[in-house]
Image: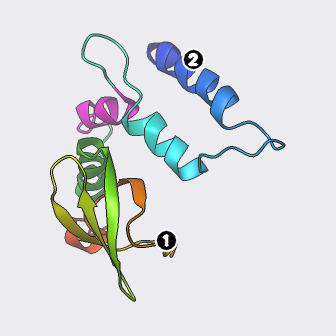
Amino acid sequence: LEAFDRITEIINRADDEYMPEPPPASPLTRSYFNAWSFFDCGVGLERETIGTVLLALRDRLTMHPGFVSILEHWQSSRMGLYELEQVNTDSVVLRELVTDKRITAINPTRYRGKVGTAWYVRVLPPPTALNTNF
């Protein structure tokens, strides 16, 4: 769609720069890059993202309310810098370095890390907490 030309151009340039075919391997994961592409890469005066455009068109696209709920949570989230304070069997405790807020989170990657290390992550509510009854 022509309306997406500007954002597509930015995402394609970033993909070439940050997600090259190995070698060398990118330090970014594909899931991180995709989240950035859909929910952080903004264009125009309103800094519109693919996510905000989809949400604006939700009624015309007749999206399922559960999918809209997921989109809203992703779009309202952001990357943050956290300190890993505790590693549990099924979760981790993170302390956001800017706000000092502590969050218990599920770590779907199962990466355990070391207590005291910095994590740059996007924290979302668990899918079971969202209105996702498809």
Q: Is residue 115 left or right of residue 72?
A: right
* x 29%, y 59%: residue: 124
Categorize mark 1 by other alpha carbons within 10 Å: few (<14), some (14-19), many (20+). Answer: few
Q: Amino acid at mark 2?
A: Glu
User: Which residue occupies the extreme bottom position in the image?
Assistant: 89
The span picked out in magenta is 49-60
Image: 3 above or below 64: above
As drawn, the label of residue 9 is: 2
C-alpha separation, residue under disc 2 versus residue under disc 1: 35 Å
Task: Report the quarter where the C terminus lies.
Answer: bottom left
Whichever of callouts 2 and 1 sits on the residue coming sooner in the sequence is 2
User: Which residue occupies the extreme right position in the image?
Assistant: 23
Q: Amino acid at mark 1?
A: Gly
Dots 2 and 1: beta carbons under 8 Å? no
Front disc: 2 or 1: 1
Q: Quadrant of residue 18?
A: top right
